[in-house]
Structures are given as C-alpha cells and as structure tokens.
Image: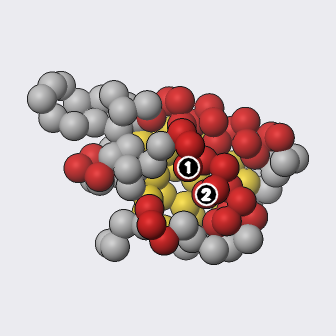
Amino acid sequence: MKFRKHVFICTNQKPAPKKSCGEAHGMELVEAFKQALKDRGLQIEIRAQRTGCLDACAFGPSLVVYPEGTYYGNVRLSDVEEIVESHLVNDRPVERLVLPF
C-alpha cells in the first residue's frame, strides 16, 4: 500500500540521563496522530507510526514527515492538530517546529 504521506514518530528509549523521545510522550504522540487522521478519514492515504531513533533526540520529541523529509522537534500533544491540518492536509509545514536539517 502506498501512502501520500508518512509520519514517523520517534519512540526511542534511552537510559537516563540521556534525553529520549519515548520518555517525552512519544507513544502518546503516535496515538494522537493516528486518532487525528482517523477522525478526518485520512488513515487510508496518510500513515502515522512509531519508529526508533531519528538521531534528533536532543530536539525531542521528534518526528519526520515523508516524502518531504521534514523533521519536527519539541513536538507536544497540543501541536498534533496543527501539524495534521497545516502540513498533512494543506502541505504547509509548521515552521515554528521544523528542525533545520
């Protein structure tokens, strides 16, 4: 199955004192993205899923949206709706959260 967009949300766990996306609500973000997509009927064309380390834990919780390869950092649960509406639906990245990689 081919998706129009694919969101990979880091849920990596690292031992303390290292920062890790999984410890900073990574799985909650996965569930929030899945629910937001389902609520809009977009789960057929856009997929959100957990992933391991994206090498952006210093900016975590982090995620990446493909096919653009746009990385987001310091993502909060309150940012999910904005990312879905702005980037996933309307193709406008949420600039305040974009990591400049």
Find residue 38 and report its horizontal and vertical position in percent. 80, 40
Q: Using the image, determine if residue 45 lies above or below residue 95.
A: above
Label 1: few (<14), some (14–19) or many (≥20) C-alpha neighbours in 10 Å: some
Q: Is residue 61 left or right of residue 16?
A: right
Q: As shown in the figure, which amino acid type bears the numbered disc 2?
A: Ile
Q: Using the image, determine if residue 39 lies above or below residue 88.
A: above
Q: Quadrant of residue 78?
A: top right
Question: What's the distance in space between the residues labelled 1 and 2, CA to CA?
Answer: 6 Å
Q: Which mark is residue 83?
A: 2
Q: Using the image, determine if residue 101 lies above or below residue 38.
A: below
Q: Let me know if residue 4 appears in the view.
A: no
- Which residue position is annotated with label 1? 79
- Do the CB atoms of the residues marked 1 and 2 lie less than 8 Å apart? yes
Q: Identify the residue shown where x is 79% and y is 56%.
A: 45
Q: Which mark is residue 27?
A: none
> Which type of secondary structure does the marked residue at label 1 adopt?
helix
